[in-house]
Image (cartoon, rainbow, N blue to C red):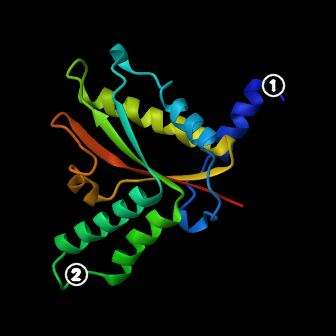
Amino acid sequence: MNKAEVLKEIIEQRRSIFPKDYNETEISQEVLDEILNSATFAPNHKRTKPWRFKIFKGEEKAKLALEMQEIYKSTQAPQVFLEKKYNDIGLKINKADAVVSIVVNFSGMVPEWEEIAAVSMAVQNMYLSCTANGVGSYWSSPKIVDLLKDSLTIEENQKCLGLFYMGNVD
């Protein structure tokens, strides 16, 4: 198969695969590095490289799950709080082998939409690398990520665009 055929196949196979479908095996560090490195090749105007990724694994990932559950619980009125949604937040994070925060860093050198577009292209590169490596992945942008500023150390000129879940699939 030539490069164009391989690329076409990877693009056509790219899907969001949700954490409920991940198995318990660990993604190798080499594959994780490859996935994150692929993001850095996204086009970006004036070479601002506006993406900021933080990977959560193990205990740090478990803390993220608890924090997001508590944010959900504390921001919902008792009459609209759903125990199932609360549990699903934790389950989704804990079922993934790795979770990556997707943060855009606004440089002020180009319009904000261009920086968001560059980050989106970086995430698409991660999706394609996941597909090529047999890793399931899913970009989620729940509203509560706006309240994760402290744990993500988000600065004034930054915004979290969501979380990228990854896990091996059968």
Which picture quadrant has residue 161? top left
**What residue would you read off at disc 2?**
80
Q: What is the three-letter code of the residue carrying label 2?
A: Val
Which picture quadrant has residue 147? bottom left
Q: What is the three-letter code of the residue carrying label 1?
A: Asn
> Could you tell me which residue is drawn at 75 percent across and 32 percent down?
6
Q: Which mark is residue 150?
A: none
Decide which of tag 1 and tag 2 comes sooner along the chain.
1
The x, y position of residue 80, in whole percent, is 22, 81
**What residue would you read off at disc 1?**
2
The x, y position of residue 51, in whole percent, is 37, 32
Furthest toward the right, the residue is: 1
Horizontal placement of 55 versus 125: left or right? Answer: left
Quadrant in which the N terminus appears: top right
Quadrant in which the C terminus appears: bottom right
Give the structural element (helix, strand or loop) at label 1.
Answer: loop
Asked if disc 1 and disc 2 are in contact, CB closer than 8 Å, the reply is no
> Could you tell me which residue is drawn at 23 percent across and 53 percent down?
146
Give the structural element (helix, strand or loop) at label 2.
Answer: loop
> Could you tell me which residue is drawn at 39 percent across and 56 percent down?
60
Horizontal placement of 4 versus 143: left or right? Answer: right
- The vertical placement of 16 against 49, above or below, is below
The x, y position of residue 121, in whole percent, is 46, 33
> Could you tell me which residue is drawn at 73 percent across and 39 percent down?
9
Real-space CA distance between mark 1 and mark 2, rounded to the nearest whole angstrom: 54 Å
- The vertical placement of 65 against 163, above or below, is below
